[in-house]
Image (spheres, rainbow, N blue to C red):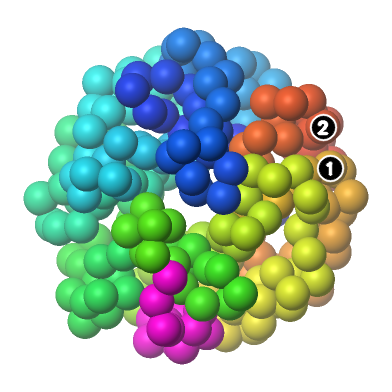
Amino acid sequence: MQLYPAIDIRGGKCVRLRQGNYNDETIFGDDPVEMALKWQAEGAEWLHLVDLDGAKEGRPVNHDVVRRIVSETGLPCQMGGGIRNEDSIALALNDLGLSRVIIGTKALKEPDWFAEACAQFPDKLALGLDAKDSMVATEGWLEVSGVSVMQLAEKFVDVPLAAVIYTNIANDGMMQGVDTGTLADLRALADMGLPVIASGGVTTMDDITALQKISAAQPNLIGAIVGRAIYEGTISVKEACGALAG
C-alpha cells in the first residue's frame, strides 16, 4: 500500500480546504515545489496533486507549478482538477509529465466517454469518486448528484483504470479520522476488483493502520492520500511510509 502526500494548489500556493469549501482555506506554503521536495525527502514515492483553480474553472490552470514538481522531484505524480476532455488529458500526461490523471465530474456526467478515454489512455486515468453520504459529489464538490458511489463504480469494473480514488468529502480536511462507513465503502469497491486509493479524513497512524488491515485482506486497496494531517503534524510522512513499507 502506497502513501500519497497531497499538495493542493491554489493561486500558486500550497493550501488545504475543509470539506472542499473554497471559503475555508488554510495556506501551508508559498512554494508547492518546496513542499513536494520535503515529502520526497521523508520517503514519499508518489505525490497527489490537486489543481483547485482548475477544479473550479473546468480546465487545468496551475501548469507551471505542476510541471516543476514533476521535473524537480522525479516522482510519479497523479493530479486532479478540471481535467474534462482529451486535450487536457494529453496536456497533463505528455506536457506536464504526470503519471496519472484523475477525472471526476466528467466521468459521472459522461461515463461512456470516460470508458473510451480509459481505453485510449490505459492505466493512466483514475476515477475520482468524491462522496457525501455515499452519493457522488461533482463540480469541485460544489454539487451532490443523485448517483451512488457503487452505481458509478460498477460501470467501470472492466475498464483499464489506473485507480479509483474514493474521498468522503464530509471528512476531508476535518481531522476527524476515517469513519466506519468509509472503510466499508473502500472494502466494497476493492471487492469489485477495482484498484482503490483512500482519501479524506486520514488523520492519525490509527487510520493508516485501519486501512493497512483492509489492504492486507484485500490487496486492491492500494493506497492512502494524506493531506491536512501531514501539514498539521498528526501524521509523519516518514513514519507512515516506513509503516506501509514494513
Q: Is residue 223 left or right of residue 89?
A: right
- The residue labelled by disc 1 is 204
Where is residue 191 drawn, in percent x and y? 64, 83
**Mark 2 burial class by Cα count in 10 Å: few <14, some 14-19, many 20+:** some
One can see residue 7 in this view:
no
Mark 1 element type: loop
Q: Can residue 147 be found in the magenta stretch?
A: yes
Q: Can residue 117 be found in the magenta stretch?
A: no
What amino acid is labelled 1 in the image? Thr
Magenta-drawn segment: 144-156
Q: Residue at x 66, y 65 (%)?
A: 221
One can see residue 98 in this view:
yes
- Note whether 52 is above or below 202 in the view shown: above
Q: Nearer the viewer, residue 78 or 139?
A: 139
Disc 1 + disc 2, Cβ < 8 Å = yes
The tag earlier along the polypeptide, 1 or 2, is 1
- The residue labelled by disc 2 is 234
Where is residue 9 drawn, in percent x and y? 41, 29
Q: Nearer the viewer, residue 10 or 100?
A: 10
- Note whether 206 is above or below 29 in the view shown: below
Q: Is residue 79 left or right of residue 231?
A: left
